[in-house]
Amino acid sequence: AEGLNLCTSGSATSCEECLLIHPKCAWCSKEDFGSTKSITSRCDFLQNLIANGCAGAIENPSSSISVVKNVPLSSKGSGQTHLDVTQITPQKVALNLRPGDRTSFRVQVRQVEDYPVDLYYLMDLSLSMNDDLDNIRNLGTKLAEEMRKLTSNFRLGFGSFVDKNISPFSYTAPRYQNNPCIGYKLFPSCVPSFGFRHLLSLTDKVDRFNEEVQKQKVSRNRDAPEGGFDAILQAAVCKEKIGWRKEASHLLVFTTDDVPHIALDGKLGGLVQPHDGQCHLNEANEYSASSQLDYPSLALLGEKLAENNIHLIFAVTKSHYILYKNFTTLIPGTTVEILHKDSKNIIELIVKAYNSIRSKVELTVWDSPEDIGLSFTATCQDGLSYPGLRKCGDLKIGDTVSFEVAVEARSCPAEDTAHTFTIKPAGFRDTLEVAVTYSCLCGCTGRAAPASGKCSGNGTYACGLCQCEPGYLGARCECEEGASGDLHHGLCREAEGKPLCSGRGECSCNQCLCYESEFGNIYGPFCECDDFSCARYKGVLCSGHGECHCGECKCHAGYIGDNCNCSTEMDSCVSSDGQMCSGRGACVCGKCQCTEPGAFGETCEKCPTCPGVCSTKRDCIECKLFNSGRLADNQTCQKHCKDEIITTVDVLETDDPNAVLCAYPVNNCVMKFTYLELPSGKSNLTVLKEPACSSAPSAVTIVLAVIGSVVLIGIILLALWKLLVTIHDRREFDRFQSERSRARYEMASNPLYRKPISTHNVEFTFNKLNKSYNGTVD
């Protein structure tokens, strides 16, 4: 194999250290194997040790499994002896694990037919549930009829709860002691508040259930939340009083119309002691620690329900469904159903929940050791394997499912340590017990010889090596520490003038003893090598794809380079069309470097601006929508077009600036589409449902269009002529007005103007009264 040998580079100094390096490493215990200067050569891959002549003296333990108990699965539940019913196989397995060596075994689970059922009905009797109480008075008979359709062995029990009878949860004033409803006009009479009251142990006499229900009366508490979790815990842990059978399926139906009090709420009433998870029912079958212990936590509820194999069914009103749905994720094996406000659907609800519980199988693990790694692979009814899954659903009664359980020890615990853990389906009484021992010691270690002559009498010979006593050194413990070492320091220098043991160790008994380093191992005949002084990439030694060996990265297969950061694999560069980097780039170190402008993506497959992209998208449209084109073969289409999201529309929107518009001809029509590259790496293609087609115009249409065009042009020309004439006339008139306003003479001084009246002067002389006058007559 290429790259560094993990076994030989691990510097193992003993067989046990060699086994911890890797599950494929083996140790040679042969005395004369390898050189006395090298310890790690004894730790190698099995094939290498055999090739080097160590056959017959190899320590290479492996993980093993043995089935201790394997009773076949039962097919029917209600038989003569219910304890003989088996729903899981095998029932006991023993594992012997070598660290890192994974082993696996198969578990089968079957929900057998006609399995006995114990159902305990736990009801909220606060005042708001009064109408519900009226509707369940004959519940026992009807429920038994329905459940007997599913099982011939059915038992029914009954209990009720309200809340802790202390302030501030209930009315505690003296006037409310006997009737907390005093002064409440809508319901003036009710019974005192109580925490939990067990009324009827599990029985097949359903008439007794009806009788107990008819005796019940509601109570009244002060705050909205109820003390239902107290009641659930007592119903789960008080097995003898409730009457849970070991050989039956346990159903606990919890009905309420409000939220529950949870852990730490009790501090409001001065209750600081956490719940102890024990049964506290007194002789009157009432919860006696209601006023001493806090409400239980969800974790405690889940633990006790699982311990007693109880399926909890929350039957709650619609307004609180979400809250209780969240509770089911925190309490394994729990379901929730919506209860009508008057509880009329309770029988339908219980049957539905029971069928839901019986339709799934989920494995749980109890007391798993910290140094054990577990992984599951489920094989459900469809025959497919689901790695990492430990549950199957949609099962029918009598179906068998299997799970592959892989187990691996991460380390070696103390010597002679053994662990046991349990695998069980949630809600089942059947379990698989797994006993684990560890194979961490080599067989040759048990044959160790103290003060062996092979070790000069100064050490223990084990697994081909000498383990020297304190003060002695050497492959055969032949040297004393510090004795005559200075005479042979030259044997500890790599070359003349070099420091002793490369300055990273001490020379003792002609051998270099390398210093320990917090960064890694220092090794070599002259301490010249280490496993941490190599090139790094992004802070990781040899990029995580190689091993540091004596200052040089020894790359794993498929990687090259000084720091092993360059992959030689080119498969990741091949695009869906079979081209290297889609023909738009080069594959460098296992990744495409796009050279085409605008190209991007893992294989440069995205390129909105590249020529030919529209034709590529067209092929996907034709094969996916119309099953035509060159990619019409379904497998080819799925391979090449797996990243294309195609949407058909009646009208194509082209206003997105990031979308590219494409078109291609189809039977004298044009198919248009747009595509947009998404951040996820996929392409969003929006395609017209039908190609855009245009019909040829008729001759009449053409003639009319020509005539209309001529007339329109004539009208436009006439309008233009009229406009020009109008503009010219207006300019001439404006010029005339301007010249007129600039005239220098008045209208009266016009030489061509004549007044209509003229005046003439006549000279005359006359006598009057013998006087002479001269004058003018007008």
Image: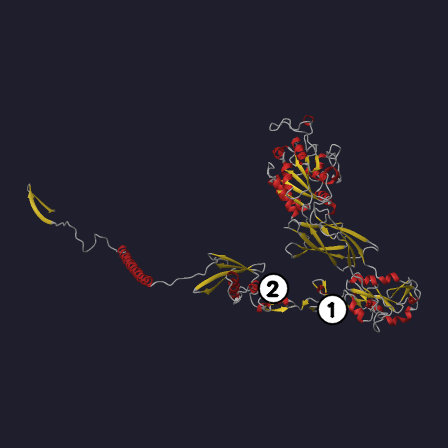
Q: Amino acid at mark 1?
A: Gly
Q: Is residue 512 above or below residue 299?
A: below
Does residue 338 appear in the picture of this structure? no
Q: Amino acid at mark 2?
A: Glu
**147 vs 226, nearest the viewer:** 147
Label 1: state its secondary structure: loop
Does residue 438 appear in the picture of this structure? yes
Residue visible at 80% across and 71% down in the picture: 51
Residue occupying the far bottom of the picture: 496
In which quarter of the view is residue 320 placed? top right
Expressed as whole percent of the image width and height from the top left, the position of residue 574 reads: 61, 67
**23 displayed left or right of 114:** right
> Dot 2 surroundings within 10 Å: few (below 14), some, or many (20 or more)?
some
Residue beneath disc 1: 3
Quadrant the N terminus occupies:
bottom right
> Dot 1 surroundings within 10 Å: few (below 14), some, or many (20 or more)?
some
Label 2: state its secondary structure: loop
Q: Is residue 103 above or below residue 143?
A: below
Residue beneath disc 2: 602
Expressed as whole percent of the image width and height from the top left, the position of residue 223 reads: 65, 34
Expressed as whole percent of the image width and height from the top left, the position of residue 242 reads: 72, 38
Q: Earlier in the sequence, mark 2 or mark 1?
A: 1
In which quarter of the view is residue 536 placed? bottom right
